[in-house]
Structure formats: C-alpha cells, structure tokens
Image (spheres, rainbow, N blue to C red):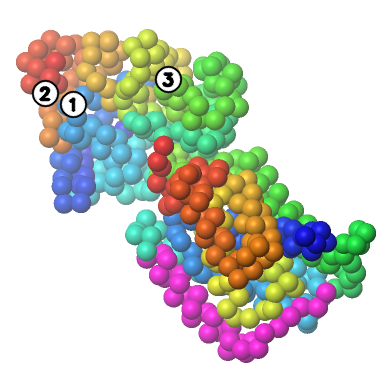
Amino acid sequence: MLSLEKVNSWYGEAQVLRNVDLNVKEGEIVALFGRNGVGKTTTLRSIMGLTPPLGKGKIVFKDENILGLPPYKIANKGIGFVPEDRRIFPYLTVKRNLDTGKKSTHKSNSKTKWDYQKVFQLFPKLEILQDSLGKNLSGGEQQMLTIARTLMGNPELLLLDEPSEGLAPLIARDVINLVLELKKEYGLSILIIEQFSPRVLEYADRCYVMDMGKIVFCGCSEDLRKDVKLQKELLGV
Amino acid sequence: MNTTLCLALLFNGIVLGLIWSVIAIGFSLVLGVGQTINFAHGLLFTFGAYFFFSISRNTSFWIAVIAAPILVAIMSLFLEVVLVRRVYGQDPLFGLLITFGFAIAMEEVIRMVWGKAAYSVSTPIFARGQLILGNFVYSRFRILLALFALTILLLVLWFMSKTSFGAIVKAGMFNSEMISALGHNLPLLRTLVFVMGGLLAGLAGVIGAPLWSIKSGMGTDVLMPGFIIALIGGLGSIKGTIIGGLLVGITTSLAVLVIPRFTDIIPYVMLIAVLFYKPKGLYGEVTILGEVRE
C-alpha cells in the first residue's frame, strides 16, 4: 500500500532522513520506534508532504508516486495524519472540529464511510461533548477528537504520531485498543510511531527501528522482542 | 450635558463602529489565514467608494451597490494572484511591503483616473429625510447605512460560525499546516479568503462613500482604525471584531464631548489598554500572525 524508497529529508542544511526504506501492506499495523530526534516524526511528515523530501527517492502510495505532491493532495489520496501534538482547533466545537476533517474532493476507497454517527459510535464521549470547545477537552478527549477528525476524511492509511504520548496509562491503553479496533473492525492500514513497549509489540504486525535518520531494523515484532541487545542500544530499554 | 447631542454622537459612533468593523473583519481574515498584513486593504476600500461613485452616477444606485464590491473583489483576486501569493509562508514583512507598495502605486492611478478633487455621493431619494424622536433628529440615510453594515456583519458571523467552510477558515487562522494535512487546498483557501476580504473592503467603501468625501487617501484614514479594531476584538473572532468596532467607534465619537482635541488618539489608547490585560484581544483566539500563546 505504502512504500518509501531511499527517502532523504532535510531541515535547512541538516539532513534528517537518510535513504529511508519502509513499507506498509494493506491491513497491517506497522510500528516505527527510535529514540527522540532520530527522524520518526520527520518520516511521517515527509510522507504527508509537510517536510518535502529531496533527491531521487520515491514515496509510492497505491502504485502512485506521491513524493512532491502538496499535503492536501496526499491527504486526498487516502492518507490520514494524526500529529504528535494533536493540533485540534481549540476555539471550534468538537462537531466543527470534525467538520474540518471532511473532504469534498476525495473519492475514497476506504471500507468505512465515516460520518458523525459512525464517529460517535466509536467515540461515544465525543457525542456528549459535541458542543464543547476543543480547548475545554482533556488530553485523552483531545486525542480521540484528533483521530476522529482524521477518520472523517475516510482515510485508507492512518499515520499516527505517538497517539498515547502524555496520556494517563488507562487512557493510553484505550487509545492502543482503539488502534487495534481500527485495523480489525474497519480495515485500516496503520503506520504508528510509539515509545517502545511490549504492549505495542503485541499489536504491531511488523516494526522498524530508526537511528540517526536511518532504518536500522526491519522485521516482525517477535524478532525485535527477542533482540535484547538492539533494544538496549537503540531504544534505551 | 445636552442629551440630544449625546444621542447624535452615540448614533454617529455606532455607524462609525459598524463600518470600521466591516473593514476590520476583512483585514483580520486575510491576516489570520494568509498570515499577511494587507496594507492594500484601505486601498480596496477606496476603490469601493470610487467605483460606487462612478457607477451610481452613470447607471443607478442599486447597480452600484452590487457592482462596486464585485469589482473590488475581482481587483483583490488580481492582487492576490499576481503579488500576495508569492509571499505566503515567508517573513510577514514581505507581505506588508508588497501590499504597501501596491497601495501607493494604485493611489497614483486613482489620482490619474479620477483627478485630485474630492467627490461626494448624493443621498438617494428613498433614503432622504430624518428620523425624529422628540427633540432628537437623525439622518435616515445614516441609519440605513448602519443597518446595511450590521446585515453584512451578521451574515459574516453566520457564515463563519455555521458553515463547514467557515469552520475551515477559522481552523486555517489557527493552524494552516494542519488544514492542508486534512486535505484542504490551502492555496485556494487563501485566495478565497483574500477575495472575501476584498469584497468586504468594497462593501465598506460603498457604505463609507456617502458619509465621507471620496478622495484618493481615504483608505489610509480607515486602515489604522480597522487594524486596531481587529487587534482589540481579537484575531479570528468575528464577534470580538464587531464589539471592538462598536467600542472604538462609540468611545471616539463621545470623546468629542470631553477631550475634543485628542479624539484621534482614542483607538490607540484603547488598543494599549486592551492588549496590556488581554494580549489576544477581547475575544482573541490567536495572537497576531497565528502564533498560539496559551
């Protein structure tokens, strides 16, 4: 479904991604691990066109090279992005935040066509809070809203940047369960950045580890779980 | 104190505040979504007044009311496509300078086309007469102009708070990158908002033309109050801009009774006072140029 081939990205003079190769198959959850500052978020931003990669690399989504397209065109191809810092619109109500996720031009092939009703089924709390301003929601509620807002655009592939960051353990567990549900019940493919944890390894089909802007490990979760040396050296576990 | 005079000044303040609010909202939208300080906004207002004057003289009042703002909107589309689009995402100073330069050049064009003389628009027949309440007498035309401005403001308020496009515009004022990542065509959104700002400036020009003398520099006189009101009300807040406009308009008008020589500085003093206590303005959602400071 998604494949990155030799992707290189820069912030000004500093090269952040170095020949990154990565792929996500349909219906898969792929986890991307690494210490802070190794280029995980930049990888997702590069896929979305928010930090456009340079050089001869390719980002292929459903057999089409999307490298060089503006973010809105990439989103309209069927990729949904849930950023690290949530970025809800604090002065819009929950319902109007959801409105901003609707796309008028996207001809989606996603298995589920999301609307208010479906979103509220998945996030009953958002229905209760639909007239509240985004800024008045708790961290967990804001995270739900960010994911719900992205779902309103009917994505086929979801890019999640540390969705459980800064959340209380119980709420973080709910978010992880939600990711699993999105895959199992709604058929979404997911590329997720998370802090390394056995729980994440349980639900990810495959995982990658990054260091210094490069992919240094690619394999199934079980291989990474067994590789204690790699966990210690690159993930600080 | 003379009650009739106070009432007249209060009404003048409301009319002034409503027109300034129409100008401020257009300015605020462009600043929020395009992150561009559009110094040509006053010029677009001036063109609104001149187009209204010329069209109403050669055709009819009602054709002028409709055609003048549309012509200004087309002009703002040209300005956005040819100049402003190039400076999006760059240092806001570029946008300020490029629109400032355009405004100066176009003021010369106005003088070349219409000459240096000031013009005035005569009151149409249907609006002639006075509103008389006891001793209080007030121009019916001014009241109609105020109602027209209020209708425009309420329409913008409805549009921004009830439609999906309004939600996207408001969201774009807060975080334009996220709007793009959600699948919305940001360049097109910026163009549409710039044209919407131009349309509002043109409408303000139509309302201002019968009240003030029409001259090439009239835009400069309204640009600063518009800018100040946008900041007092709070960028991103239509309600705040309307309230800010009324506050500044009424205070400036009534100040004639107390400090007649210093009325011009009232908006500036109010701006300092408001921003001192509320840096985002009265109902502000974002600080200037969209930088969020929670």
Quick check: B258 left or right of B276? right
**Residue at x 72% of width, y 57% of height:** B14
Dot 1 alpha-carbon crowd within 10 angstroms: few under 14, some 14 to 19, many 20 or more:
many
Where is residue A102 drawn, in percent x and y?
A: 54, 36
Where is residue A104 drawn, in percent x and y?
A: 55, 41
Residue with the mark numbered 1: A34
Number of the front mark, 1 or 3: 3
Residue with the mark numbered 3: A140
Q: Mark 2 or mark 3: which comes first in sequence?
A: 3
Residue with the mark numbered 2: A234
Dot 3 alpha-carbon crowd within 10 angstroms: few under 14, some 14 to 19, many 20 or more:
many
Residue A136 is at least partly visible in this image: yes
Q: Mark 1 or mark 2: which comes first in sequence?
A: 1
Start and end of the magenta stretch? B94-123
Three-letter amino acid code of the residue under disc 1:
Gly
Q: Is residue B43 positioned above or below A134 on the image?
A: below
For the N terminus of chain A, the quadrant is top left
1 and 2 marks in contact (CB < 8 Å) = yes
